[in-house]
Image (cartoon, rainbow, N blue to C red):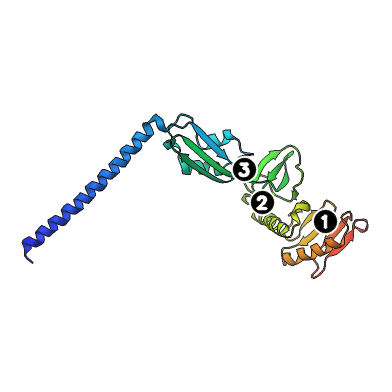
Amino acid sequence: MSIRRKKNKKIVRMKRRNNRVAKFGGFLLLVVVTLLVLMLTPFFNVKWIDIQGADKVTGGEIKTAIQYNAGENVFKIRLRKSKQALLALPYVETAEVHRKLPDGIRVKITERVPCAYAAFGGSFVLIDKDGRLLEQVKTAPENIPLIDGAVLKGLSVGQALSDKDEERAQAFSVLYEKLNEYDLYARATELNIKITENLGFVYDGNKTVVIGDGYRLDYKLMMLQVALDELAPSEKGTITLMVEGKAIFTPAEEQ
């Protein structure tokens, strides 16, 4: 192949490459211009917001988190930043933010659910299954257990027990998970995590269950279920699960 022919092929390749670059540059310019036009067109100004899944979280809190302003262009809502801001709200577990063209925003959240509470200053704080502090209340709630031994000093609403004490937070998590698995949590009135090697809880408000450490916890809870089936609901006392292979019940009058 002659030198001239090689040179001509090289020139052709360069022209093709330059054409591709020019076309791509033109496409990018078109996209940028289109976005600018959309952001300046009143047709895309926000006129409505649809909020789904919110009960504890107010519409005002959600609008503030996503920096929602009626009349602002819908493309100015930053979806990822809005989602992160929503997840920072104490009661929000999951969040989705979508533009609904031409003029709407849809927010869908899943809220955290209180499953326990603890004394917090002169009041109480609601806590979810992940140990997140959800809300400070003046009176003790009903139908969820008190956590005895949780370290709350230095924490504020929105933080988790694990931010202060990972060991006790893990103890609470294990108790919550396992007691639910064995259908015991709904009747627990108090969880004791003061000493993580000596866990326990109060069942039906009148039976103190001493679990000990988490060794063979499934086996201990199966023993407990057998023991509870044999006891009358009104019987008061302590059920000790620390002895291998046994669940020992000590009546209240003998304590």
Residue 37 in the image, given as x and y percentages of width and height: 34, 34
Q: Amino acid at mark 3?
A: Tyr
Q: Between residues 68 and 125, which one lies in front from this camera angle?
A: 68
Is 75 left or right of 212, judged from the image as shown? Answer: left
Contact between labelled residues 1 and 3, with CB atoms less than 8 Å apart: no
Residue 150 in the image, given as x and y percentages of width and height: 71, 50
Assign a secondary structure to mark 2.
loop
Which mark is first along the chain, 1 or 2?
2
The residue at 40%/31% (across/down) is: 43
Is 212 left or right of 52, judged from the image as shown? Answer: right
- Which residue carries the number 1 mark? 208
Mark 3, Cα crowd under 10 Å, few <14 / some 14-19 / many 20+, is: many
Is 146 left or right of 2, judged from the image as shown? Answer: right
The residue at 32%/40% (across/down) is: 32
User: In this rendering, is residue 206 above or below 74?
Assistant: below
Q: Quadrant of the C terminus?
A: bottom right
User: In this rendering, is residue 231 above or below 80?
Assistant: below
**Location of residue 184 by image quarter:** bottom right
- Which residue carries the number 3 mark? 91
Q: Amino acid at mark 1?
A: Thr
Give the CA separation, mark 2 to mark 3: 12 Å
Q: Amino acid at mark 2?
A: Lys
